[in-house]
Amino acid sequence: MPEFILRRLLIALPVLLLVSLISASIMELVPGDPAVLIAGQSASDAEIAMVREQLGLNRPFVERLGSWYAGIARGDLGDSILLNRPVTQAIAERVPVTLALAGFALFLTVAIGLPCGIIAAVRANTWVDQAVLTFALIGVSVPNFWLSLMLIVLFGVMLDWLPAGGYVMFADDPVGWVRCLILPGLSLALLQVGLLARISRATMLEVLQQDYVRTARAKGMPMWSVYGKHALKNVMVPVITVIGISCGLLLSGSVVIETVYSIPGMGRLLASAVFGRDYPMIQGGLLVTAAVLVLLNLLVDVLYALIDPRVRYGQR
Amino acid sequence: MAEPLLRVEDLRVVFGPPGREQVAVDGLSLTLGPGEVLGIVGESGCGKTLTALSILRLIPNPPGRIAGGQILFRGQDLAHASEKAMNRIRGKEISMIFQEPMTALNPVFKIGEQIGETLRVHDGLTRAQARSGALQMLERVGISNPAQRLGQYPHELSGGMRQRVMIAIALACRPQILIADEPTTALDVTIQAQILLLLRELQSELGMAVVLITHDLGVVAQVVDRVAVMYAGRIVEEGSAAAVFERPSHPYTRLLLESIPTLDQQQDRLQTIPGMVPSLSNLPAGCRFHPRCPDVRPACREAAPASFEVAPGHRAACIAVNNYRHAN
Amino acid sequence: MASVDSVALAPDEPAGADRPPSLWQRLLGHRLFVTGAVIVVFMLLLAIFADLIQILPPEKMQVRLRFQTPSFSFPLGTDNYGRDIWSRLAHGARLSMAIGFAVALLTGITGTANGVFAGYFRRLDGPLMRLMDALMAFPAILLAIAIAAALGPSAFNAVIALSIVYTPRTARVVRATVLVVREMDYVAAAKACGARDLWIVWRHVLPNSIAPLLVQLTFIFAYAILAEAILSFLGVGPPPPAPTWGNMIAEGKDYLREAPLLCLFPGVAVALICLGLNLLGDGLRDVLDPRLRVQIG
């Protein structure tokens, strides 16, 4: 197993290197002079020169790249132009909020999507199956930011059951914290619920055709064991991969959802960095999220190998 | 013979949506005595596997289902038993092993768990007891290093080993009946012989009855007491192995036996049965074998022949047998 | 030992010896595919004939007729500038479909090129696929926003940004097919006959990739429309007053309390077209390549 993890890590390294390179290159895409754009149309030449100096735009790209990597090595991703403070500091402050939101959404995804998909497969071609499929299809089609707005109108404004936005710290008010997360969590989870339900249904249908399920039945295993143990553990193999992908989608979605619900997480931080043309913040944010996702996928691979012994020996 | 352990009466298995059903097993009856080894022989698709699966009610439904008949096991009709009652019988009273040892074991559970859980479910053993039970079974089916094997996954074992593990699972609870569906077909020839030998040993040791399903007459000749030959969903001949092999009475059985290549006879080419197995959607009227039968008579096209006694305990479903009997 | 195995007889073999139905017949017999096709064609007609079915030009403001509820003259009402929502919706369909189609087309080309090169020329596989992995490592929307923001908000730049984001997903699908096809005997035969690599790719590898590629591109069409709405909503898509559905929702969100219909209609439009494309993709997958599982963006 340690060897397996090491092998995966070796594949992840070049990806991380490329990820950091792509993050660093984002500013190169800006047509014209980024300094003018950042400083604004009405800025004086001196102001523009100062921005240029601050971002190192007067140095060649290769040199800037060198200091970018030197910074990464020191754990320094530069200073945010808008917030006037280190990017790492700003991100570290926002990460727990996004983790809480994404974690809650992931919980909803697994708690709703997986059982729905499995029940649909067990009751294939009945009305239960049809209902799950329809729900899942709607889930993957409805834009989450629009769903958020509709939920806000319905539950936040018309019924006034839940807060229409904002965020309170768990430490300050645990109940308020949960109430704040319900609508954004649901909005964020809907797409993944749809995806997971579809995948787990398809996988379960395939697994139920397998000989080993028939063996389990021939052994006289009760229904809960045939479905909940023998079939489920095999279903979990691809489902774990999907959950890994879901984590990426959840971080993607948090940019939009946090903006709509005014939640002070990383997504909103990055969205406002985009509007404010805060390139150091954009670059740092891209790097951090991508690195987190690469490591998360590493974790998924390890879980995968734990569930399916064949993976460990490279037989799959 | 004493009261049979298992009696299948007029079993009908159909496939397809209601209204467009195709009959795969048509009015099949057989009996199995305690400790008896019965072979069911036939070509692929003759319904022998379906017959086996219906005894444990494992036919995939939909599309298949038991449409009629009774399966009496110690007085209980399995064809109409509840799923719960079936689960008390499966793996405990009647066990089954399958053709493909490669796919029949669950890839994500350890061997020990797959054997042990049967013991825990049926005999209420604890984890530790089940573990030692599994260890004993692995030893009994001739697996080397059983203690180490318990912690291994199926993909770490060879095909023959996996079939031994399947047998260990099936026999863990000492069932009364073992149904073995082509247990050696997927294995190498040398391994085949070992597995058959093992089955034989275990059968006499445990005193269980065995239903051995195969298309391989060589296998049947080695281990079976009684044999039933199936063709297109029906039993065409049934009797003791000796009687059927020495005096095959149905033309189909005769042709099957003739198609076995032998060493003592110099043969230029293998004998084959002309024609093809009929498809379920297009079964011939009358005797289902008549299009391929070498001595077909007009009456064969009219009605399905009844089963006639050739000798005590030896029956064949062919009107030629009847005529022969009357002529004597 | 003797084996009496002969022709296998599948119990579930369909009755009769009818000619197998053609591709079109199978597609038209697929209920969900037809539903999806009807929705997509409806949206397509809306997009094509937007100029004919509009009641007013989409950017025409009527200060006195702001926030009109649906009526005979304005079937879906008017927005905060008194613009006709129906007309804006129709033109929004044109923009959304155009952007979605352009992204699907562009990723189709770049993804196929990447997939074929990575899958067929083994030496390129490592570097190309690591690059694709790296692009996939970013959350899709975040990368698209960053690129679109850097390039500047416009429809063209949205297409570029989304194509960069979705290329790896297409490349993976194509590469997987190529890896299977290149091991086929007929490719070896073609090689033995002295066929050149590029010819083999064109003649043998590409045709086999078309089915999974088409399925994947249908889904990417849907993702692109969804993502474009998000880009517009966040202000990095085509800038207002362009009548994109995302812009309409973004503008409407300030009037959620008073006039929720401003947000409702464009959102339903996005959901509807995505639903249609998803159904279309599911149907295509079922018919063209049943072994493919649900693809994930």
Image: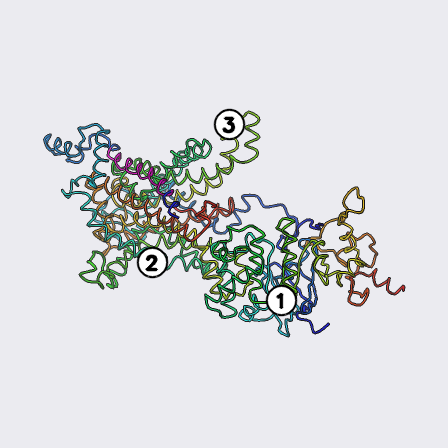
- In the picture, measured across the screen, residue B57 lies left or right of residue C135, that is right
Do discs 2 and 1 share a chain? no
What segment carries the magenta color?
A7-27
Examine the image and state in which quarter residue A160 appears.
Answer: bottom left
Q: Nearer the viewer, mark 2 or mark 1?
A: 1
Q: Tell me which secondary structure the magenta stretch mostly adopts.
A: helix
**Residue type beneath disc 3:** Trp
Residue A47 falls left or right of residue A302: left
Q: Is residue C67 magenta?
A: no
C89 and C233: which is toward the camera: C233
Instruction: Choose between B254 and C55: the one closer to the eye.
Output: B254
Q: Position of residue B12 (x, y in %)?
A: 66, 64
Q: Can you tell which mark lies on residue C199?
A: 3
B27 lies above or below A105: below
Where does the image place residue A186, in percent across and percent down from the top left? 31, 57
The secondary element bearing badge 3 is classed as helix
Name the residue type under label 1: Leu
Q: Residue B149, image x and y in percent? A: 50, 55
Q: Which mark is residue B206?
A: 1
Q: Compared with residue A228, is residue C186 higher up or lower down, i.e. above or below?
A: above
Q: Is residue A157 visible?
A: no
Quadrant placement of the C terminus of chain C: top left
Q: Residue furthest front?
A: B145
**In the drawing, what numbered circle is on residue A126?**
none
Q: Chain of mark 3?
A: C
SS under mark 1: helix
The chain identifier of the residue carrying mark 2 reads A
Label 1 marks which chain's residue? B
Residues under numbered marks 2 and 3 in contact, where contact means CB atoms less than 8 Å apart: no
Pointer 2 residue: A108
Q: Residues within 10 Å of mark 1 (few under 14, many from 20)?
A: few
Q: How is the image coloured?
A: rainbow
